Image (tube, rainbow, N blue to C red):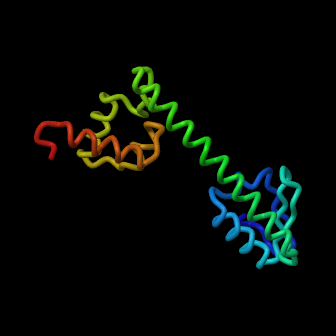
């Protein structure tokens, strides 16, 4: 969308792929059409150019609301499933990106002045992931604050 220019058409598989809620959907579509960019939703078979009728706007709002409702239901069911799995003791969460030993080694190297960006790149993780592990090492190390 950042490269779209006046006269372009942004083709989206489904409304729920473009936005997480109705407000975002309406804002994005309105913003793009105001710049002369058409938006086409394949699944819903709808197109918006900025010269749309009131019924088109209504369809966008209603179908966007239905997509948001479906997404909210899926997230609610997922949360319920995770809670049930936790109660059964079978849910452990996402695997850590670094082992405690790797995190401790990276923390030692960072404390010695090595570039955190380079350490993250070398470990194959984002800088934010590295920072999270460094904070955890700092809080679990005796005298680490």
Q: Residue 52 vs residue 32: left or right?
A: right
Q: How many marks?
A: 0
Residue sitting at 48 percent across and 32 percent down? 82
Give how far across and how far down residue 142 sits, in percent. 12, 37
Give how far across and how far down residue 111 sits, in percent. 24, 46
Q: Is residue 50 above or below residue 103?
A: below
Q: Which one is in front, 38 or 5?
A: 38
Q: Which one is in front, 118 or 57?
A: 57
The N terminus lies in which quarter of the figure? Answer: bottom right
Q: Which one is in front, 43 or 54?
A: 54
Q: Is residue 84 above or below residue 37?
A: above
Residue sitting at 75 percent across and 72 percent down? 32
Give how far across and how far down residue 96 sits, in percent. 41, 32
Give how far across and how far down residue 120 sits, in percent. 42, 43
Q: Residue 122 vs residue 142: left or right?
A: right
Residue 19 figure quarter: bottom right
Residue sitting at 69 percent across and 64 percent down? 25
Residue sitting at 46 percent across and 41 percent down? 125
Residue 140 figure quarter: top left
Q: Is residue 91 above or below residue 42?
A: above
Residue positioned most to the left: 143
Q: Is residue 76 above or below residue 54?
A: above
């Amino acid at each position: 969308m950042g490269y779209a220019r006046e006269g372009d058409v942004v083709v989206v598989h489904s409304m729920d792929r473009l936005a997480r809620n109705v407000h975002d959907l309406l804002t994005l579509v309105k913003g793009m059409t105001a710049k002369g960019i058409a938006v086409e939703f394949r699944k819903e078979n709808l197109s918006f150019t900025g010269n749309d009728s009131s019924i088109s706007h209504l369809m966008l709002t209603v179908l966007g609301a239905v997509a948001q409702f479906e997404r909210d239901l899926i997230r609610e069911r997922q949360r319920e499933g995770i809670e049930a799995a936790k109660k059964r003791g079978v849910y452990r969460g996402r695997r850590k990106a670094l082992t405690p030993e790797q995190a401790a080694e990276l923390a030692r190297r960072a404390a010695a002045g090595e570039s955190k960006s380079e350490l993250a790149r070398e470990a194959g993780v984002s800088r934010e992931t590295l920072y999270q592990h460094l904070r955890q090492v700092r809080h679990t190390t005796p005298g680490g604050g």
